Amino acid sequence: MGNYLFLLPYISVVIKRGLFFYFSETDILTIIMALAKLEKKFFGTNGVRGVTGQDMTPIFALEMSEAYGTFLGPGKTVGIGKDTRTSGDALGAAVSAGLIDAGCNVIDFGILPTPALQYLILSKKLDGGVMITASHNPAEYNGFKFIDADGTELGDDKTIEVEQIYLNKSMVHASWNEVGHLFYDYDSYLIYIDAIVSQFPVGIGKGISVAIDPGNGAACRTAPEIFKRLGCDVHVINGEYDGTFPGRLPEPSEEGLKKLSEEVVKTGSAFGIAHDGDADRAVFVDEMGRFIDGNIMLAILASYFAEQNHGGEIVTTLASSGVIEAVGKQFGCKTINTVVGSPYVARTMREELDAGKNVFIGGEGNGGIIYPSHQFCRDGGMSGATLVGLLATKKTPLSSYIDSLPKFTMYQEKRMTSRAKEITEHMRSYFVDYPIDNRDGIKIVKGNAWALIRPSGTEPLIRVYTESEDAAEAKALMDLILAEITPYLA
Ligand code: MG
């Protein structure tokens, strides 16, 4: 939360004139939070996660949801959804119970992708949402995240308020005539599918064959339907809901997508698409079955929009590849880098649009792409549909796009350490003579290469990225940094 010197004049007024004369309750809470330098204790960038039966239990979900319901206030309506994890039923029941106990009404949308829940919250004008998911984590994990009324992830300040209610045990328990009610709505996911399909001309996918791997996760029902509705021929693997994830891990890694690659080649598909457990991300293979890095895919989709939006903006993170900026430049577009995390990308996109800028795409290099014309959150289903739109318009194979992009080489390493912040400080002084960006760990430029050194927000580890158009230069910079941080890892 940074520097709080700006609060000094307010504090002196408070001391001189008395607290309540000048400030509302919200102002006071904001000041107290700032003074105490409150940070999120349970929630990371994408919700709270843990191992089922250990640190992720229905009791925790119940109490945290009571806190969220208390934060929202009585009579509010909250949409909930879940992915296919085995512990989803228990956590979902606990989340519903907590919200109802706090006086909120709950609409249970069942199993659906996170972006589908986000779309429904916005389009149905609900007051908030809870998605029960551990995204790409292995099967034993689960968790949940809160969604704001505008469909975006609940911001840091509001999340801290919910956590404070939970920690202070100041949850409200509604009386018998004020408790909320539970409603079931297992059909509204179709509204989300309609929203995506309506972004494209009718039948645009005719003649395009797509291989789909929802990974037994939340997209099993939505992904095939989206492509069918676009007019594509679909071939589905790992398409049954199964929280044991028998087909592959929920993380759509290159290793896990071998079966999808085979399916693409076998069926002569134009591409293959795989989702993570809650389908906010989409990862692709080309028509030859080659895995496509998320940065490359963002660059390809950005180039498609950039061609139509000369002078517009692309928003991505400090960890994304330079290929995105290079492609944007070819079309006269500016690239804005935010701190790492899709909620920050989404928020920046909104701010830029509010400022009258033309932002046409945003996202991260892990397959999480955001289209402001659809909604302000990353959406795996929309990413796949957009690729159909691109291939139908351009009539050239996906591989030709990959081969035509400027070549960058990125190295990514992570090291377990409890001294991640210390390492960052050391590297900050080490690179003191180089251009440096301090917003998220440190990002420096050395010659034709850049490096990002960033402590993880959720795990005891440090991540290092280096990249250059010259592979040797990127490798040399990575070797230099790893040698420099090694003494701290012992
Ligand atoms: Mg996810």
Image (spheres, rainbow, N blue to C red):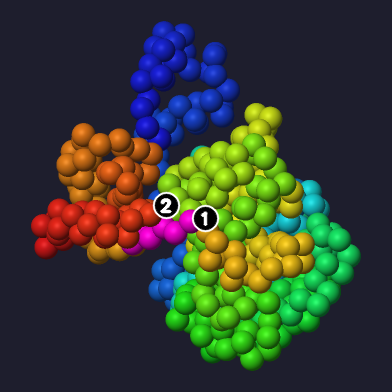
Instruction: Answer with mark 1 or mark 2, whichever residue precedes in sequence.
Output: 2
Does the magenta portion include 64? Answer: no
Q: On screen, 40 above or below 435?
A: below
Tag 1's secondary structure? loop
Q: CA distance from mark 1 to mark 2?
A: 8 Å
* 140 in relation to 167, above or below: below
Marks 1 and 2 in Cβ contact (< 8 Å): yes
Mark 1 crowd level (few <14, some 14–19, many ≥20, 10 Å Cα) = many
Q: Which mark is residue 364?
A: 1
Q: Amino acid at mark 1?
A: Glu
Report if the beta carbon of the residue with label 1 is closer than 8 angstroms to ligand 1. no
Tell me: 401 left or right of 17.
Answer: right
Q: Which mark is residue 319?
A: 2
The quarter in which the N terminus is drawn is top left
The residue depicted at 21 percent of the width and 34 percent of the height is 433
Percent across and percent down for residue 215 are: 59, 81
- Against 226, residue 234 (above or below) is below
Which of the pair 11/266 is nearer the observer? 266
* Residue at the image position 51 percent from the left and 75 percent from the top: 291
- Of 459 and 175, the residue lying toward us: 459
Question: On the picture, is 429 further left or further right than 76?
Answer: left
Provide residue 437's location: percent of width, then percent of height.
35, 38
Q: What type is the residue that disc 2 sits on?
A: Ala
Q: What's the magenta region? A: 406-411
In the rendered image, the residue lying farthest to the top is 16
Q: Ligand 1: does it lie within 8 Å of the C-beta at label 2?
A: no
